Amino acid sequence: MNFWTSVAFSLFSGIMIMLGGWIFTFKKNWEKRYLDFFIALGAGYILAVALLDMIPEAFAIMPSCMIFVILGYLVVHLFEHVLTPHFHFGEETHQHLISSVVGYSALVGLMVHNFFSGVAIGSGMLMDFDSGLMIFLGTVLHKIPEGFTISSILFAAHHKKRYSFIGTVALALASILGTTLIYVVDLRFEEVKTVALAMSAGTFIHVATTDLIPRINDTESRWLPAVLFLGVAMFLVSQKLILH
């Protein structure tokens, strides 16, 4: 019974992610200035997730995890700036606001994050129902902003709403997969989880600081860079709700 309850919790979390994506894609057309706003919002959010959630959790288990954080950063840098000759951020296509590498990096990072959210729900349910319920309530608070964030980033990268939909489905499936696997195999190897979290944090830092923030800082708008604070605040509010 706990297994099916855990899967139901993860499924509901996935629906919340897709709801966040649907909120973004509900509008037929987004003007460039609005997309820039959501890019700035997403930059603040994923930067906060990396620095205030993923890295502290990984560091508490493995103090040497920072080597994997920088490795995650360098992997994105390798594919985006070293292996791609004459790459100019934001200029490789006229219709796309950010590169596809940025979009996929954010997607992979959030998939890893959601996978271990699913693992956490399953692990809590294996202990007792109350623990699983509290973990579920904590993780689900992040899901709508995550769906909104990945939808806006993928749309800015591809300018097609189907990529936003695919991205939210991928995040939802990652959570369900994490919950299911905790019942099938032993995922209590903290080192594996720590390395994955640390590398994902590194990719988030690259996407936020090297790709997204420079773009919004280069706009003519004087208020757009301040939206970054709103993205960080969005994470802090959801984290505060979790703590309570």
Image (cartoon, rainbow, N blue to C red):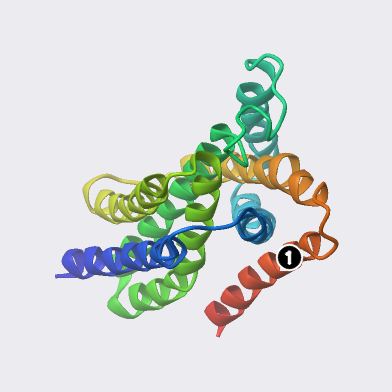
Q: Quadrant of the N terminus?
A: bottom left
Q: What residue lies at 37% left-to-right and 75% top-to-bottom? A: 131
Q: In which quarter of the image is the C terminus?
A: bottom right
Question: Depth check: 50 or 104 in front?
Answer: 104
Farthest residue to the left: give it: 1
Q: Residue furthest bottom?
A: 244
- Label 1 crowd bin: few (<14), some (14–19), many (20+), radius 10 Å: many
Q: Name the residue under label 1.
A: 227
Amino acid found under the numbered disc labelled 1: Val
Q: Where's residue 45, x and y in %?
A: 63, 60
* Residue at the (81%, 59%) spot, across then down: 221
**Vertical side of 100 occupied by 46: above or below:** below
Q: Which residue is drawn at 57% across and 80% down?
A: 243
Residue 211 vs residue 173, the one in the foreground = 211
Report whether 168 appears left or right of 32.
left
Q: Position of residue 20 (x, y in %)?
A: 43, 66
| 37 vs 236, nearest the viewer | 37
**Left or right: where 207 falls relative to 243:** right
Percent x, y of residue 56: 66, 56
Quadrant assignment, res 76: top right
Total numbered labels placed on residues in the image: 1
Looking at the image, can residue 24 be seen? Answer: yes
From the top left corner, tell me how far across and down residue 165 is, in percent. 36, 52
Q: Reply above or below: 43 against 16.
A: above
Q: Can residue 195 be seen in this view?
A: no
Residue at disc 1, secondary structure: helix
When the figure is inspected, residue 32 is found, relative to residue 9, above or below; the finding is: above
Residue at x 41%, y 50% (from the top left corner) = 161
